[in-house]
Structures are given as structure tokens and as C-alpha cells.
Image: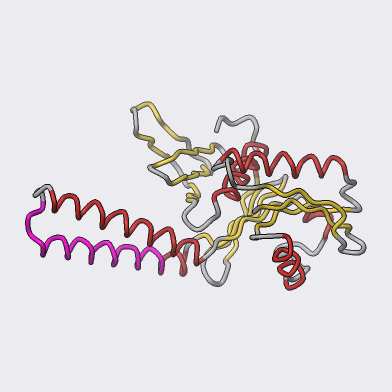
């Protein structure tokens, strides 16, 4: 269950809310619906008196408990009215772990079927393949913990990327962004934010990048939140085709 809630800045009281169900809304559809609902609330309530946030919980009671335990201070800003203009996407260790486990299971199934149809006829190769998959997923998880993008905040002037356990910040002003490339590989969404370079997609199925860039995948982020992040990028640089 997803919630868009409106809080009064002065009292921190919730004055309005909308519940969004996953049911028939998947991927970008749910993200777009959540974003539109948030914008409707922002247009309805004055930003100097209220701020709107997007939350996830199993039910309303769980969300209320979560909000009571959360800190009222938002990383990167101490001004509540400014936070209403900032969308923050926070990575989840458990979510990345589950994604890696899913990939591990899928890889194991593929190896098993290759064994069944005799393309891989040696059981030792099957066990070795599973071991290699496990090592790769473990290294990927540890690398994300140490240097991966843990959080992204985006506002009307640009975005801030936080890396590693120490949350080392990298600020990108929107004027630095020369291109935004979004594509889907299997069930994985990847965003490349180009900082001075360009993307060349003249070869079918292949995209070549020039210059520095920030690469963000949806591995550690919830699907709906990542969709909202892409919507915010579109709004940040409307002149760029995404």
C-alpha cells in the first residue's frame, strides 16, 4: 500500500491523505499515479503552510507508527518548506538483497534447464555455475554497501547523490546535465545522467556514452519510487528527451 500524505508545517498534523493500491497498477503506472496525486495535493495546499510526502506501508496504522518514529529532520535541509520541493529516494539493503536472491534463483533455474537439455552435461559445471553466481551477487552487494548510490535527492535546481555507508555527497546542478538516458534491460531500469557528454544510440540495441556520467539502477530502490524519480528528472530538464 502506498500513501500520499499532507502535513501542516506548524503542527506536524496530517490533514489529508490518499491511499494507492498496487493491485492493477504496476511499474510506471503506479509511479505516475502517485506523482499526479502528490502534485494535486501540492496545488491544493499552500506550500508555506503544508508539505506533501510519499510513503509506503502495509496499512494506515503501520504508517502512523512509522511517522512517529521517524526523525523530523530531512538530510540536506533544515527548512520544512524547502523539503516540500525535494523528492528523496532512499535505497534499501533488504530490497537489494531480495533482488540479488531473485537473480540467483533465476540463474539457477536457467543452469538447471541447460543441464536437463544436456547442453551442460557435467553436474560439476552446474555446481560451479551456482557458486560463481553466488560470488558475483555477494561482491555486487558489498560493492554497493561501500561505494554504491544509497540515496538521491532531487529538487528544482538539481540533484544530490549520496554514496557508500558514509553518504558522501555529489551535487549536480541542472545546468551541468547535458543528457538523460533511460532504458530497461530485462527487468532492470537504468538511468544515465550525462555531465558534459552525450549518448549515441545510432547502433540498434547499443548506446555509446561520452564524457562523465552518473549511472543509477533500480536494484536497491522501490519500483514506484524509482518511477517518481524519473518523472522528477523529466520535470528538471524538460528540454531533454528521456
The residue lying at 86 percent from left, 63 percent from top is 12
Q: Quadrant of the N terminus?
A: bottom right
The picture quadrant where one finds residue 127 is bottom left
Q: Is residue 140 magenta?
A: yes
Tell me residue 50's x, y (percent): 87, 53
Tell me residue 68's x, y (percent): 77, 71
**Colour treatment of the image:** secondary structure
Which is the main secondary structure of the residues drawn in magenta?
helix
Q: Is residue 8 left or right of residue 221?
A: right
Q: Is residue 123 magenta?
A: yes
Q: Compared with residue 120, is residue 64 higher up or lower down, i.e. above or below? A: below
Question: Between residues 220 and 166, which one lies in front from this camera angle?
Answer: 220
Q: Quadrant of the C terminus?
A: top right
The residue lying at 7 percent from left, 55 percent from top is 121
Tell me residue 174's x, y (percent): 65, 43
Count of numbered marks: 0
Tell me residue 83's x, y (percent): 77, 56
Q: Compared with residue 16, is residue 240 higher up or lower down, i.e. above or below? A: above
The picture quadrant where one finds residue 204 is top left
Q: Compared with residue 156, is residue 112 higher up or lower down, i.e. above or below? A: below
Q: Is residue 120 visible?
A: yes
Q: Is residue 44 left or right of residue 30?
A: right
Q: Is residue 170 visible?
A: no
Q: Which residues are magenta?
A: 120-142
The residue lying at 65 percent from left, 60 percent from top is 57
Question: Between residues 233 and 160, which one lies in front from this camera angle?
Answer: 233
Q: Is residue 235 left or right of residue 179?
A: right
Amino acid at each position: 500500500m502506498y500513501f500520499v500524505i499532507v502535513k501542516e508545517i506548524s503542527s506536524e498534523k496530517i490533514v489529508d491523505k490518499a491511499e494507492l493500491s498496487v493491485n492493477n497498477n504496476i511499474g510506471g503506472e503506479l509511479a505516475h499515479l502517485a506523482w499526479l496525486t502528490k502534485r494535486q495535493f501540492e496545488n491544493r495546499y499552500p506550500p508555506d503552510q503544508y508539505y506533501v510526502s510519499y510513503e509506503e506501508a502495509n496499512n494506515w496504522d503501520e504508517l502512523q507508527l512509522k511517522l512517529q518514529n521517524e526523525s523530523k529532520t530531512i538530510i540536506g535541509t533544515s527548512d520544512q518548506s524547502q523539503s516540500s520541493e525535494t523528492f528523496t529516494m532512499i535505497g534499501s539493503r533488504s530490497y537489494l538483497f531480495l533482488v540479488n536472491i531473485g537473480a540467483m534463483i533465476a540463474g539457477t533455474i536457467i543452469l538447471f534447464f541447460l543441464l536437463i537439455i544436456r547442453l551442460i552435461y557435467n553436474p560439476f559445471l552446474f555446481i560451479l555455475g551456482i557458486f560463481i553466481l553466488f560470488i558475483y551477487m555477494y561482491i555486487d552487494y558489498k560493492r554497493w554497501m561501500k561505494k554504491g548510490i544509497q540515496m538521491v535527492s532531487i529538487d528544482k535546481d538539481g540533484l544530490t547523490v549520496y554514496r557508500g555507508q558514509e553518504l558522501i555527497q555529489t551535487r549536480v546542478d541542472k545546468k551541468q546535465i547535458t543528457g538523460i538516458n533511460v532504458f530497461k534491460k530485462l527487468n532492470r531500469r537504468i538511468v544515465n545522467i550525462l555531465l558534459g557528454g552525450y549518448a549515441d544510440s545510432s547502433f540498434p540495441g547499443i548506446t555509446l556514452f561520452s564524457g562523465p556520467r552518473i549511472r543509477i539502477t533500480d536494484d536497491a530502490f522501490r519500483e514506484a519510487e524509482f518511477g517518481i524519480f524519473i518523472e522528477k528528472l523529466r520535470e528538471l530538464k524538460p528540454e531533454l528527451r528521456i
